[in-house]
Image (tube, grey):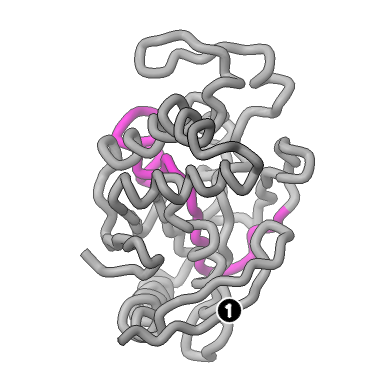
Amino acid sequence: MKKWKEYVFDVNGFQVNTIYNEETIEKIFLPLLRNLTEMQKKKNRRLIVFMAAPPAVGKTTLSKFLEYLSVQSEDLTEIQAIGLDGFHYHSDYINTHNAVVMGKEVPMKKVKGCPETYDTEKLREKFRRIKEEDILWPVYDRTIHDVVEDVEKITKDIILIEGNWLLLDEEPWRSMKDTADYTIMIRSEEETLKERLVGRKMKGGLTREEAEDWYINSDSVNVRRVLKTSLDGDFMLKVEADNDYIEL
C-alpha cells in the first residue's frame, strides 16, 4: 500500500497543498537530485536542466517540490526551479496578432499556450547567457494574466526549467535543447490529462459538457502535440491517474 505525505509550499505566489508517495520520493526523486548534484560538481559550473511535460501533469508543482527537497539535505546542491510561461508574448501582442499553427493561421488569443505564442527569440537570448550570468528571468503573473519582465534573479548552481515545449522536436525548440545539460520528460495517458483539465474548467464554473467542449477545441491540441512531437528526455517519468510517478 502506498504511503502518502502532504506537503505545503509556494508555487508562483500561491500556497499549494500536495501529496507525494514517500516511496517515490526515496526511490525516484532523491536519486535524481543526487545525480544532478554529482553532475554539477563534476562540471564545476551552473547546470541547466529541462523538464518537459504536457499540460496538467503537475510539472510546475513537481519542479518546486524538487527545489524544496534540494534544500532539505546538506549533501544536495540547491535547485532553483523556474518556468517557461514568462516567455509568452505580452497580452497586448497576443490580442492583436495571428499565428500559423500547424499550417493554419489563427488569432493568437484563441491558441494562447501553444508554442507559436512564445517569444522564442527572447528565450534564446536568456539561454545564451544563463550558464555564465546571474540573469533576470520573466514570470507569468496569473493575477493579471500577463508577463512581467525580469522578476526572478537566477542565482543557484542547478537551474531546473519547466515547460510544455522544451523538448518539442520542431525548430526553434529543437536547437535550443542544446542549452540543457540534462533533460527530463514526463508522460501520461491522454485520458488522465483530459479528466484533470476538464475538472479544472468545471471548478471554474463550466458545466461538464462545456468543459469537454473546451478540451476538444483547445487543451487537447496542446496535450497531443506534446505527447506526440516531443523528444524523449535523459530521464523519463510517467504520472499515473492517482498522481504518483513511475520511472520509464
Image location of residue 209, percent across then percent down: 49, 33
Element type where label 1 sits in the image: strand
Along the viewing direction, whichever of 209 and 37 lies nearer the viewer: 209
Instruction: Name the quarter where the C terminus is drawn.
Output: bottom left
- Tag 1 residue: 7
Task: Name the amino acid type tagged 1.
Answer: Tyr
The single residue placed furthest to the left in the displayed view is 248
Image location of residue 186, percent across then percent down: 34, 56
Residue 98 in which image quadrant: top right
Residue 34, magenta (yes or no): no
Instruction: Name the quarter where the N terminus is drawn.
Output: bottom left
As drawn, 126 above or below 12? above
Residue 61 in which image quadrant: bottom right
Image location of residue 14, percent across then percent down: 71, 61
Along the viewing direction, whichever of 103 and 78 lies nearer the viewer: 103
Residue 177 in which image quadrant: top left
Image location of residue 176, percent across then percent down: 40, 39
Q: Which residues are magenta?
A: 152-178
Tell me the residue at 40%/80% (across/down). Answer: 21
As drawn, 231 above or below 9? above
Tell me the residue at 47%/28% (across/down). Answer: 213
